[in-house]
Image: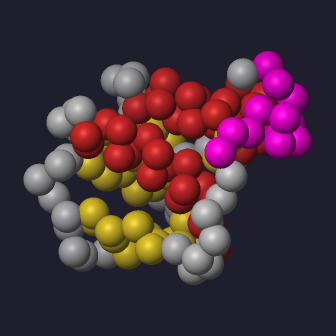
Amino acid sequence: MGTLTYGGATAYEIDDRTLAHLEAVIVTKLRRREYLTLGWAIEAHEGSGRVHLSLHEGVPLELSYRHAERHRLNRVWIEAIMEQANSAQGVMLMTEDEAMQAAGHGTSDGAAASS
């Protein structure tokens, strides 16, 4: 599991592969000086509820990966996250399979991946 630390405060655990795809979208949006919102549900065994962050270029953001190797990125997944990032509701974490199904590609099999 990697971590996303926002504002130098709370660190949120996100698996490395998901974090790599989020990074691609977050860096693109912040480079354009656009803010974005990011949210996810908190599972019942962790207390329930949800987390919602408003990411802005003026607030420190750190992405740390547990493993050093770079993940091969799935373009369809990045496009799905970017579509959400450009919406009024913002990004709600989704799995790779959820992104593939939403795009009509079935489940992830690496066919839509690019480096």
Residue 106 colored in magenta in the image: yes
- Quadrant that contains the N terminus: bottom right
Q: Position of residue 44 (x, y in %)?
A: 62, 66
Q: Is residue 24 above or below residue 14?
A: above
Q: Position of residue 3 (x, y in %)?
A: 46, 72
Q: Position of residue 36 (x, y in %)?
A: 30, 38
- Say whether residue 41 is visible: no
Q: Is residue 72 above or below residue 103?
A: below
The structure residue drawn at horizontal position 68% and vertical position 52%, both measured from the top left corner, is 72
Q: Splitting the image into 4 quarters, where does residue 60 fall?
A: bottom left
State the predominant SS element of the stretch in magenta: loop
Q: Nearer the viewer, residue 39 or 14?
A: 14
Say left or right for 85 vs 22: left
Q: Position of residue 95 (x, y in %)?
A: 68, 47
Outermost top residue: 104
Say left or right for 88 vs 12: left
The structure residue drawn at horizontal position 60% and vertical position 55%, both measured from the top left corner, is 18
- Say whether residue 68 is visible: yes
Q: Is residue 69 above or below residue 34?
A: below
The structure residue drawn at horizontal position 33% and vertical position 68%, both measured from the top left corner, is 62
Q: Nearer the viewer, residue 27 or 85?
A: 27
The structure residue drawn at horizontal position 54% and vertical position 56%, both measured from the top left corner, is 20
Magenta stretch in the rendered image: 104-115
